[in-house]
Structures are given as structure tokens and as C-alpha cells.
Amino acid sequence: MTDNSALDPEDRKIVTLARSARARNGVPEGAAVRDETGRTYVAGTVVLPSLQLSALRTAVAMAVASGAKSLEAAAVVTDADSASDEDRAAVRDLGGPGTPVLVAGPDGTVRSTVTAG
């Protein structure tokens, strides 16, 4: 586990936003990404009969649709142990392989930081 107080304030912000999205929408995951200009994009899991997207892939799609050229960081709040390979690939596509992905539990405590790799 990571001491959240040791996180950069901007990283703490995206974890908080991701946690809020999860709680507000009652979905399995919440996510937030920060683009190269510092703008943030927040999303929850999307589950429709014709469309299923993880929270992180939805947040990346929102960033792309809003004109983001790159990502500085991403965060996902989930019960899972880590971000899925597919989620990390979406972050990598926009941010590059070194983009950090903070993985936090439902309480917002960051459990690990992985790269989009």
C-alpha cells in the first residue's frame, strides 16, 4: 500500500475523482486521467447491452474525444489487484509506455502504481 499523503497533489486529485465517480454512480470502477495540459477526465464503468467499457478505457476515450494529445497520469479505483492489460494499453496508446497508472482500492488508498508499459 502507498501512503496517499506521499502522492503528488495532482495524483491525489485524480484518485479522489476516480473514487467519487465510482461511489456516485454505484459502478464497479471509477477512473480519472490527466492530460498534458493538466485537464482531468473522470468516468465510471459503462455496461449497456451493446457497449461495455471499463472506467479507465472510458476516461481515456473522453480525453481523446476532448482533444487531449497525451496523458500525464491515470488512476483507477477498483476491487481488482491491478489495472487490466487492456486498460493499460489504452493509457499507453495516448500517454506512452511510461505513463503511471495508480491503482487504488475502494477506500481510495493507492495499492500500487504500474506503468502503462
Image: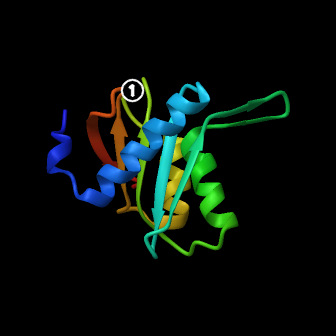
Query: In the rendered image of this protein, does residue 75 appear above or below residue 83?
Result: below
Q: Is residue 29 visible?
A: no
Nearer to us in this view, 88 or 4:
4
In the picture of the structure, the residue carrying the numbered disc 1 is 106
Q: Is residue 69 visible?
A: yes
Q: How far across and how far down the image is residue 36, in percent?
A: 45, 74
What element does badge 1 sit on?
Answer: loop
The kind of residue tagged 1 is Pro
Query: In the rendered image of this protein, does residue 34 appear above or below residue 42?
Result: below
Q: How far across and how far down the image is residue 26, in percent?
A: 58, 24
Q: Residue furthest right?
A: 50
Report crowding for label 1: few under 14, some 14 to 19, many 20 or more residues within 10 A (C-alpha): many
Q: Quadrant of residue 8?
A: bottom left
**Looking at the rendering, in which quadrant would you find the C terminus?**
bottom left
Residue sitting at 52 percent across and 52 percent down?
A: 89
**Looking at the rendering, in which quadrant would you find the N terminus?**
top left
Nearer to us in this view, 7 or 82:
7
Residue sitting at 18 percent across and 38 percent down?
A: 2
**Residue 40 placement, left or right of 57:** left
- Tally the marks: 1
Q: How far across and how far down the image is residue 55, in percent?
A: 57, 40
Residue sitting at 46 percent across and 76 percent down?
A: 37
Q: What colour scheme governs how the chains and residues are painted in the rendered image of this protein?
A: rainbow
Q: How far across and how far down the image is residue 16, in percent?
A: 38, 43
